[in-house]
Image: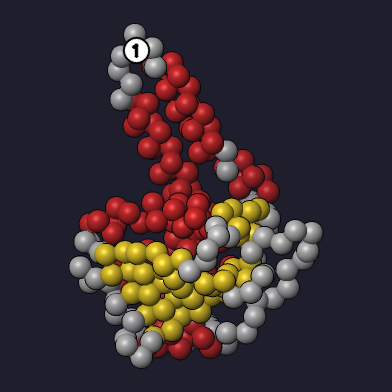
Amino acid sequence: MNWYKHRRLEDVYRSASVSLKRLGELNNPKDPLFVTRQQQLLRQLNESIAPLAPLIQEEQWQMRIFPQTSSLISLLKRAMERVDGLIKQRQLWSQIHNDNETNLTVGGDVIKIELVLYELLLVACLRSEAGGRIDIWCRQIDSRWLELSITDNGRIEPQLITDLETGRAVDLLAPSLLDHPPGLHLMVCQSLMKQIGGEFNLYKLEDERILSRLVIPLAQPNRSVTGPPAS
């Protein structure tokens, strides 16, 4: 819950800061476009802080599921915008590989899916060496499910992958890589994806790349979504 709220507040702060900066750059009230641009930025500010209302009122003590839809392209664009500064800072090469001929529509709790995708991209960037590469692979599994995979050439402790697969030990006093970031955040992402009807797994491929695999639901007209297909 703390991870979720912290990431949501970070997102609101980022969006509001961008709009405030642009608002401050409007320095010529006599310009005919001044009022139009000012109103546009004020509207963007209102849209930035709007998510705080349900967060405060309806998710005070526990998270709730808010079904929404979003185009896959928009989801990926927003997620990449969040890590754009880090990618440039670490001089990483990034590319999205979308094998789908049409722009699919993602269903479920889009906000939480987006936060998980951002977290996985963030962790991938942080563990990658300068000049490395980040790839996002999009593959439609069937009419109900979409696979989003992130590959990177970073370094990871093999035990972390094992701990994520087996889960936290029954003995809570036993040390675990899931007690602190990035393991803790990845465990939260895994738990969150289960709650919203999806799936997250972490693997190391034969070519030493690290694979972060998400299975997320596609929007279904008038049909409920059951559990994701077996990996």
Three-letter residue code for mark 1: Asp
Residue 113 x, y percent position in the rendering: 55, 61
Q: How was the colour assigned to the protein in this rendering?
A: secondary structure
| Identity of the residue furthest to the front in this view | 101
**At x 48% / y 22%, what residue is drawn?**
39
| Identity of the residue furthest to the bottom in this view | 206
**At x 37% / y 37%, what residue is drawn?**
18
Q: Is residue 155 left or right of residue 77?
A: left
Residue 91 x, y percent position in the rendering: 21, 61
182 relative to 231, above or below = above
Residue 107 x, y percent position in the rendering: 64, 59
| Identity of the residue furthest to the right in this view | 222
Say which of 58 and 91 sits in front: 91
Q: Is residue 73 left or right of residue 59?
A: left
**At x 57% / y 43%, what residue is drawn?**
51
Say which residue label 1 marks.
31
132 relative to 4, above or below = below
Say which of 200 and 97 sits in front: 97
Q: Secondary structure at mark 1?
A: loop
Say which of 171 and 36 sits in front: 36
Residue 126 x, y percent position in the rendering: 30, 67
Q: Is residue 215 left or right of residue 226?
A: left
User: Is the C terminus in the top left, top right, bottom left or bottom right quadrant?
Assistant: bottom right
**At x 47% / y 44%, what residue is drawn?**
12
